[in-house]
Amino acid sequence: MAELWFSKDVYINAAPVFVNNAVQSFVYAGSVASLGYLHTTSKSITNLYLTKPFYKQSSELVQSALKAQAGVSYTFLNKILNLTIGGDAKLSDKIDFGATAGLDHLIKKQFSNNDVLVVDPSFYAYAGTQNFSNTYTKKKAGVLIFPGGTEQVTENVKQFNILAYEISVPLVYVKGKWMALVTPSYIIPQNLVTVPNRPDLSETGQSMFYASAGIKYSF
């Protein structure tokens, strides 16, 4: 990722996305760019952002359906627990809305050589809209001596549900202009959309441990 700050609050960044698995070996899938406003005080953090993905048409990544995303979050800071609330809108073939709520406790250790270690145990809940179709059989009333019948009815349904819970422990080590970041996480999906006897049309998901890592250098 490359990131440029126009001021202490306004930034823009961009990152290429590559896919590496048993079928594809580091294949370029597209790029993602973001424009944001991040303002920090001793009592709060305000974050507004606009994200625009540029995926290749041939990309099979699920997130390649996303055309744009805008969001905002606000964090209340204190010495015991930080509280974060936020919301976003995602544009694909429809507009979906999301919400985030989280708690974290920041632990900071500064060493004699001015290196800094930050540990931030966190718990987050994610919610959002789900779009799916619901098909059922409806009984039609008869008229006089003529018996009623049945018909299949399909409705498009949009619901706002809890989508996942996540526990994570971000670790950040800062040495001069270098920063190392590691975030082990455990995510628990909720309210998966399922179709009886149709696994091909159902969402699949299970609780999973994963980790992300990176190195950052500031000029």
Image (cartoon, rainbow, N blue to C red):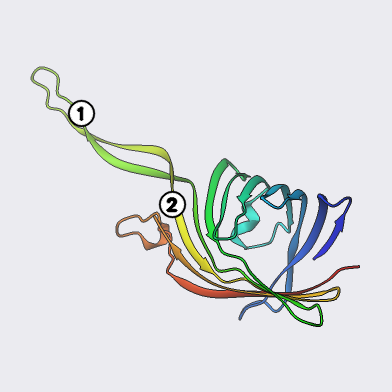
Distance from disc 2 to disc 1, alpha carbons, whole Å, reads 36 Å
On-image quarter of the N terminus: bottom right
Callout 2: SS: strand
* 43 displayed left or right of 7: left
* 170 displayed left or right of 218: left
On-image quarter of the C terminus: bottom right
Question: 193 or 181, which is in the foreground?
Answer: 181
Q: Vertically, is 22 above or below 46?
A: below
Expressed as whole percent of the image width and height from the top left, the position of residue 133 reads 40, 43
Question: 206 or 56, which is in the foreground?
Answer: 206
**Quarter location, residue 215:** bottom right
**Quarter location, residue 72:** top right
Q: Which mark is residue 162?
A: 2
Expressed as whole percent of the image width and height from the top left, the position of residue 50 reads 73, 46
Question: 80 or 39, which is in the foreground?
Answer: 80
Q: Which mark is residue 171?
A: none
Q: Residues within 10 Å of mark 2 (few under 14, many from 20)?
A: some
Q: Vertically, is 86 above or below 175?
A: above
**Quarter location, residue 118:** bottom right
Q: Residue at x 38, y 37 (%)?
A: 155
Q: Vertically, is 152 above or below 76?
A: above
Q: Which residue is drawn at 20% across and 28% down?
A: 140
Q: Which residue is drawn at 63% across and 47% down?
A: 74
The residue sitting at the left extreme is 145
| Mark sitting earlier along the chain (2/1) | 1
Q: What residue type is labelled 2?
A: Ile
Q: What residue type is labelled 1?
A: Lys
Q: Which mark is residue 140?
A: 1
Q: Residues within 10 Å of mark 1 (few under 14, many from 20)?
A: few
